[in-house]
Image (spheres, helix red, strand yellow):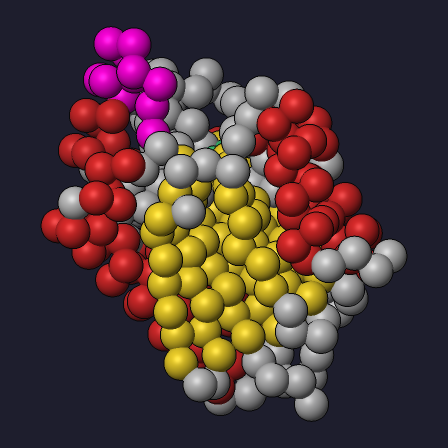
C-alpha cells in the first residue's frame, strides 16, 4: 500500500500581476484548491490515480481562470482549439485529443479514447464529431470563449507576448499506480491547427511505472526535448525528480523556451519545478493540501 499523493499545476508563465495582487491571486488559489479537493476525494476513497487526475483536470477545465477548457487561450482566428492527454502509468493505456472547439471537458474526451482502446490521439473536427456521437459531451463554442481570453488576444495582436498557461495533474494511488493528465488551450494567438506539447505523450504528458509528468510552457521546446518521457526515464535510471526536472528545463531553455513541470515518483517523491517567474501549483496528501503561485 502506498500513501496516495496528487500534484497539480495551473500553468507557468509571466504571472507577475497575479502574484503581487491578492485580488488576482485569490481565484487562482481557489481554483487549485477545488481541483485538489476533487482529485484528493477520489484518492481518499481508494479510487485510482487515473480517475484522480481526470477529476482534478476536469475541475480546472471548468474554471475560466485557467487556460484549458472554458477560458482557453484563443487562436489568431479568435476561437479555441483545446488539446489534452491522459495516461495510466500502470499499463500504458492512453488517450489524447487535439484541436477541439466544442467539447466541455477535453480531458474527458481523451479518457474516452483511453477506455475505448483503439486509437490514442484524435484531432480536428472529424475526430470531435465522432467523440460527440459516442457520448462525449459537446458544448457551445461561446461557452469556452471568455472575455478575458478575447482581451488577451487583442493584446497579443497589438504586440504583447501573450499569457500562457495549461493545467495538469499527476497522482499516485494506494496500489502504487501512477497517472498523468494535461489539458490546454495552448498559446494565445497560435496559428489555427497548431498542436502543442500537452496532448503529445512523451512531450508534455507521460506516466510509467517509475514516474508521472505533466508540463506547461513553450510547447515547441517541450516537444523538441521529449521532456516528459526523458524525465521519467532518467528517474527510472536513478535520478531524483529534482535533478531530472532541472535538467529538462535547462534543455528547454537551450531551445529558447521556459515553463514548468510537475513530477511524481512511484515511491512518493515529488517536484513542482519552473523556470518562469510563477507557476500555479499544489499538492494534496491525506494529511492536507497546499498551493503556491510565486516561483
Ligand atoms: N504548453 C502549452 C502549449 O504549448 C502552453 C503552456 O503551457 O503555457 O500548448
- Residue 249 appears in view: yes
Residue 178 lies left or right of residue 139; in this view the side is: right
Which image quarter: residue 116?
bottom right
Outermost residue, left side? 23
Q: Position of residue 17 (x, y in %)?
A: 22, 37
Q: Residue at x 31, y 67 (%)?
A: 34
Asked if residue 145 is positioned above or below residue 152 in the image, the reply reads: below
Outermost residue, right side? 237
Q: Nearer the viewer, residue 275 or 215?
A: 275
Q: Position of residue 126 (x, y in %)?
A: 53, 33
Residue 114 lies left or right of residue 142; in this view the side is: right
Q: Residue at x 80, y 51 (%)?
A: 234
The quadrant of the rendering that contains the N terminus is: bottom right
Asked if residue 207 is positioned above or below residue 99 in the image, the reply reads: below
Q: Residue at x 27, y 21 (%)?
A: 153
Q: Position of residue 36 (x, y in %)?
A: 40, 69
Q: Which residues make up the magenta segment?
A: 153-163
Q: Nearer the viewer, residue 4 or 124?
A: 4
Q: How many marks?
A: 0
Question: Is 156 covered by the magenta stretch?
Answer: yes
Q: Nearer the viewer, residue 247 or 75?
A: 247
Q: Residue at x 42, y 47 (%)?
A: 295
Residue 64 lies left or right of residue 221; in this view the side is: left
Which image quarter: residue 114?
bottom right
Question: Is 60 covered by the magenta stretch?
Answer: no
Q: Position of residue 21 (x, y in %)?
A: 16, 45
Residue 39 lies left or right of residue 15; in this view the side is: right
- Residue 86 appears in view: no
Amino acid at each position: 500500500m502506498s500513501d496516495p499523493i496528487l500534484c497539480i499545476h495551473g500553468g507557468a508563465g509571466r504571472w507577475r500581476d497575479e502574484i503581487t495582487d491578492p485580488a488576482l491571486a485569490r481565484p487562482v488559489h481557489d481554483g487549485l484548491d477545488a481541483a485538489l479537493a476533487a482529485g484528493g476525494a477520489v484518492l481518499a476513497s481508494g479510487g485510482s490515480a487515473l480517475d484522480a487526475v481526470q477529476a482534478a483536470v476536469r475541475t480546472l477545465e471548468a474554471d475560466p481562470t485557467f487556460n484549458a477548457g472554458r477560458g482557453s487561450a484563443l487562436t489568431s482566428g479568435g476561437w479555441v482549439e483545446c488539446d489534452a492527454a491522459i495516461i495510466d502509468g500502470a499499463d500504458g493505456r492512453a488517450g489524447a485529443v487535439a484541436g477541439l472547439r466544442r467539447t466541455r471537458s477535453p480531458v474527458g474526451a481523451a479518457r474516452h479514447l483511453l477506455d475505448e482502446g483503439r486509437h490514442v490521439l484524435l484531432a480536428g473536427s472529424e475526430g470531435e464529431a465522432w467523440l460527440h456521437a459516442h457520448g462525449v459531451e459537446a458544448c457551445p463554442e461561446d461557452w469556452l470563449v471568455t472575455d478575458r481570453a478575447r482581451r488577451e488576444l487583442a493584446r497579443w495582436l497589438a504586440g504583447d507576448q501573450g499569457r500562457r498557461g495549461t493545467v495538469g495533474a499527476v497522482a499516485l494511488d494506494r496500489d502504487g499506480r501512477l497517472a498523468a493528465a494535461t489539458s490546454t488551450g495552448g498559446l494565445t494567438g497560435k496559428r489555427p491547427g497548431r498542436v502543442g506539447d500537452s496532448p503529445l505523450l512523451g512531450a508534455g504528458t507521460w506516466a510509467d511505472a517509475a514516474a508521472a509528468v505533466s508540463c506547461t510552457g513553450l510547447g515547441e521546446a517541450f516537444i523538441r526535448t521529449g521532456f516528459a518521457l526523458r524525465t521519467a526515464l532518467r528517474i527510472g535510471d536513478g535520478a531524483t525528480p529534482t535533478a531530472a526536472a532541472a535538467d529538462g528545463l535547462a534543455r528547454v531553455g537551450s531551445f529558447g523556451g521556459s515553463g514548468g513541470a510537475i513530477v511524481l515518483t512511484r515511491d512518493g517523491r515529488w517536484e513542482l519545478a519552473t523556470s518562469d517567474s510563477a507557476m500555479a501549483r499544489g499538492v494534496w496528501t491525506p494529511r492536507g493540501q497546499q498551493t503556491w503561485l510565486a516561483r
